[in-house]
Image (spheres, rainbow, N blue to C red):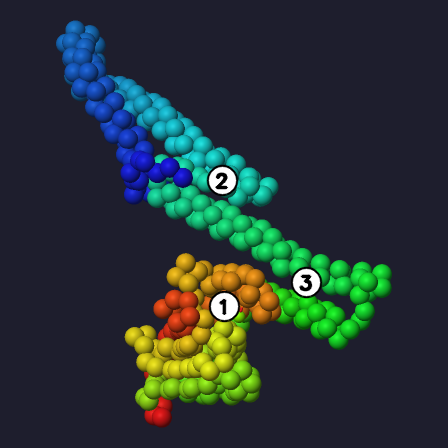
Amino acid sequence: MTDVRPRSRTGIAARLLVAMTLVLAVAALAGWLVASALGPTLFHRHMLDAERGPGGMMQHAEQAFASASAVTIAVALAAAVLTALVASTLLARRIGASLGTLSAAAGQVASGRFDVRLDDPGMGTEFDDLADAFNAMAGRLDHDQELRRRLMADVAHELRTPVATIVAYVDALEDGVQDLTPEAVEVLRAQTSRLTRLATDLSAVTQVESGTLVLDRRRVAPRLLVDTAVSAVRARADDAGIALVRRVATQLPVLEVDVDRIGQVLANLLDNAIRHTPAGGTVTVSAERSAAGVRLSVDDTGEGIDEEHLPYVFERFYRADTARDRAHGGSGIGLAIAKALVQAHGGSVSARSAGPGRGSTFAVDLPAPAEPGFIGS
Ligand SMILES: Nc1ncnc2c1ncn2[C@@H]1O[C@H](COP(=O)(O)OP(=O)(O)O)[C@@H](O)[C@H]1O
Ligand SMILES: [Mg+2]
């Protein structure tokens, strides 16, 4: 991917024009040289013949003119053909070489080597653009392959622990080392539900990130999104002894979103907030105006997130406190799903925290539709 030479912005048309102009110029030059070198001598000889020999002056002049033009045209034509031959051979060789490199690289990509990149072909804008597009394609394939590899590794890692626990319990039950106590059943149930959750989350994140997700956008007031999300977790928050507060600004623009998907985003954020906030804490869901549209946020007074983990919490399988978050039953995919869903809406997500023990805030910024509507509240 070295790109040291400055790129020329001339295209193939310009190069062809130059070649043809060169052919014409060489022909003209050859014609002119021949005409100026041969013409006078030919005329001179014919004039001498006219004085001495038979035939009139006129006839000799005509003969002189005819032979001078014939020679001139023949030489000019020969020069033109020769130049055209050289120019088109050179041009064809350059184009052929560039195409050859391209097809060799395409062949490598086809055989699964996604790390090949084309150097600047130096054959005009069309080839430069083609090389850029090719490199972008190879880069994208390379990136996707890397993602796939990482995903497989992550999934294998996630499967190993619950499966190992289940196998150990089943073996122990079979050997009579362990009785089927309510605690054992509880452990088995927790591990199987972790597997179930992993499967659900994986299929969700795969669907969203592959871009095959079709959004069913509808006009909806932000207030409704907040209310629905809050009602869904009201009972859980009460059980956990957490105060649930909703705060919706007045005069918010109407959003045009897939209500279920944004509901899922808020549900994931609320699930985290409740899980990471001890009894006596508060979780606040709010909707307010932002530069581009509306900002929905979920704020808690809980454990908070250390600065070193903040940039990564939206990554798949990332857990700030691995042991504890895993014990909580989290698969570490909730925020990755939330991010992908919000991005599918043209929005963005962000996380803030004043540090461990000082709560966290997750914000979802959604753009308002181009043709705005307002709902007073
Ligand atoms: N409200 C929060 N307070 C503290 N930490 C959080 C909060 N939300 C998310 N996190 C951290 O971010 C990690 C990723 O979250 P998420 O993708 O939802 O995975 P999980 O399945 O663990 O909930 C969590 O494991 C946790 O460490
Ligand atoms: Mg979560």
Residue 260 bears which disc, if any? none
Q: Residue at x 18, y 19 (%)?
A: 36
User: What's under tag 3, amino acid-wise?
Assistant: Pro
Q: Residue at x 42, y 63 (%)?
A: 306
- Write down the residue under mark 3: 162
x and y percentages locating residue 167 in the rendered image: 76, 60
At mark 1, the secondary structure is: helix
Q: Which of marks 1 and 3 is nearer the N terminus?
A: 3
Cβ–Cβ under 8 Å for marks 1 and 2: no
Front-most of residues 305 and 314: 305
- Write down the residue under mark 2: 116
- Write down the residue under mark 1: 335
Q: Which residue is drawn at 34% across and 92% down?
A: 376
Instruction: Specify whether 209 is left or right of 15.
Output: right
Can the viewer see residue 191 in this picture? yes
User: What's under tag 1, amino acid-wise?
Assistant: Leu
The quadrant of the picture occupied by the N terminus is: top left
Q: Real-space Cα distance between discs 1 and 3?
A: 22 Å
Mark 3 neighbour class, 10 Å CA radius: few under 14, some 14 to 19, many 20 or more: some
Image height of 138 relative to 320, above or below: above
Front-most of residues 257 and 339: 339
Front-most of residues 46 and 318: 318
Q: Earlier in the sequence, mark 1 or mark 2?
A: 2
User: What's under tag 2, amino acid-wise?
Assistant: Val
- The yes-or-no answer for disc 1 within 8 Å of ligand 1 is yes
